[in-house]
Each structure stands twice: as structure tokens, then as C-alpha cells.
């Protein structure tokens, strides 16, 4: 299993140290930096030569907050996966972070097991949303009265193979799993995924999942468990 390089961004030193202590027990997690605010985090990313895989991002930080930092980082470094880790569980906070490019959203009272699981999922599949977050996304789409939906799922927009890949992405399959199921190479899967990002104007794989919800490729039901 590949080592996952992780950065923790939080203005509370005690919390950062606690999270670091917890995560360093996982043999495939490598904590490469602790940032005390968004400005510190961005400066580190600009100057480091180490590949960053995942950032655990607090929202309420001085200098530059987590939302603004996510926006800047996602625009310049879209391959870095950002997981919001915060005390704020309101709908507006969740939708805002997802809109600016967060791959997942966790509350600080989550269990250590769930945090570790989420990091692994985000690293392997590009995103992870629990049922609560997915339902908020779904309700937000409905309340937008279609304003955020650019068009219906158009066969002229997406090819049959791209739709197949999108469906499997929405089911949280990895690149290798999609390749195996469709009898194509992982490199071809990556090509289809890049085309999907361009055609749907999605910011990341998480955006493709939201697109899938909009187009009813994913149905949110009471027993839904992605």
C-alpha cells in the first residue's frame, strides 16, 4: 500500500498534535507538515517539493480561513485532496466547502475510525461523502430549482463509454476497478475521467458525483449508503 502524505491545517496546536498522534499509528500515513493557518499552509505548498496527497482542513483559522485556502489550493493544485475537518456542521458550511473543491467533510466529533476510513477513501477514489453530506447536497440541488443544473443528461454531450465510467465513479469504484469491469486499461479510464471533468465542468471527482446526483445517476433513498 502506498504511503499517503498528509498535511494538518488547524490553528489549535493541541488538536493538531492529537490528530497527528492518532494518524501516525497508521503505517501508510505520513504527516509531513502542520499548518497553523491558511496562509502558513499555502506558503508551505508553494515552497515544498514533497508531493501532498491529502490535507485535513479546519475552517475557522486566522490570516486565511479554510474556505479561502481551499479555493486557492484547489485552483493551483487540483490533485491535492482536501478534507474539511471542522466543528461547523451547518448546511451552508458544507455546501460552500464542496463548491470550492473539498473532497470530503468531517466533523471534529467524528470517530477516529471514520477519519482514517475517510482519508483512505479520498486517497483511493477522490472523494467520500457520508449519508448526511450527500443528503445536504441533494436538498441543495432541489432547492436551487434547477439553476445549478446546466442541462439534462445528453447523449450528445457524453459518450456511452463516458456514461459507463461516470456510473462506476458514482458507485465509488477505483480506476483499476473500473478498468477491470469495463475491460479497458486504467490509462483509458483516466482519459474518460478527464473528458468527463471537462464536459461536465466539474472541479474534481467529487464534482462528478454531484453531477451524477443532478442527473439522477445516483438516487438518494432512505437506505442509501455510498
Image (cartoon, rainbow, N blue to C red):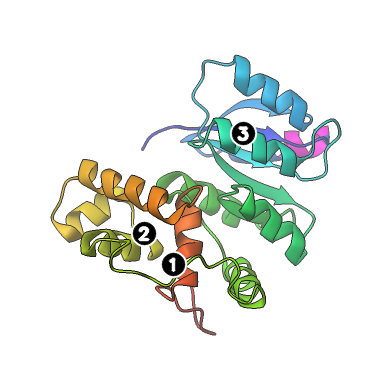
Report the front residue among 177 and 184: 184
Vertical side of 169 occupied by 33: above or below: above
Crowd band around label 1 with a 10 angstrom C-alpha radius: few (<14), some (14–19), many (20+): many
- Of the residues tagged 2 and 1, which is closer to the observer? 1
Report the front residue among 69 and 111: 69
Give the dominant element type of the magenta stretch: helix, strand or loop.
Answer: helix
- Residue for badge 1: 212
Q: Which mark is residue 40?
A: none
Please state if 190 lies on the left or on the right of 46 as rendered.
left
User: Which residue is found at the position 52% from the left and 36% from the top?
Assistant: 80
- Residue for badge 3: 73
Please state if 11 lies on the left or on the right of 188 as rendered.
right
Q: Position of residue 50 (x, y in %)?
A: 51, 19
- Residues under labels 3 and 2: Cα distance? 24 Å
User: Which residue is found at the position 51% from the left and 63% from the top?
Assistant: 210
- Residue for badge 2: 169
Amino acid at each position: 500500500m502506498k504511503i499517503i502524505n498528509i498535511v494538518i491545517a488547524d490553528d489549535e496546536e493541541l488538536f493538531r498534535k492529537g490528530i497527528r498522534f492518532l494518524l501516525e499509528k497508521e503505517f501508510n500515513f505520513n504527516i509531513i507538515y502542520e499548518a497553523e493557518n491558511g496562509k502558513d499552509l499555502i506558503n508551505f505548498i508553494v515552497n515544498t517539493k514533497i508531493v501532498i496527497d491529502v490535507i485535513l482542513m479546519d475552517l475557522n483559522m486566522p490570516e486565511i480561513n479554510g474556505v479561502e485556502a481551499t479555493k486557492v489550493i484547489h485552483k493551483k493544485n487540483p490533485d491535492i485532496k482536501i478534507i474539511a475537518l471542522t466543528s461547523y456542521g451547518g448546511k451552508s458550511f458544507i455546501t460552500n466547502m464542496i463548491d470550492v473543491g473539498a473532497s470530503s467533510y468531517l466533523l471534529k466529533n467524528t470517530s477516529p475510525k471514520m477519519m482514517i476510513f475517510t482519508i483512505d477513501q479520498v486517497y483511493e477514489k477522490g472523494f467520500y461523502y457520508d449519508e448526511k453530506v450527500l443528503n445536504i447536497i441533494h436538498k441543495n440541488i432541489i432547492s436551487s430549482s434547477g439553476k445549478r443544473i446546466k442541462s439534462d443528461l445528453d447523449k450528445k454531450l457524453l459518450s456511452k463509454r463516458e456514461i459507463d465510467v461516470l456510473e462506476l465513479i458514482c458507485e465509488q469504484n477505483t480506476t483499476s476497478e473500473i478498468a477491470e469491469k469495463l475491460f479497458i486499461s486504467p490509462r483509458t479510464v483516466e482519459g474518460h475521467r478527464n473528458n468527463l471533468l471537462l464536459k461536465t465542468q466539474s472541479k474534481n471527482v467529487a464534482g462528478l458525483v454531484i453531477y451524477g446526483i443532478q442527473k439522477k445517476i445516483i438516487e438518494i433513498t432512505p437506505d442509501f449508503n455510498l
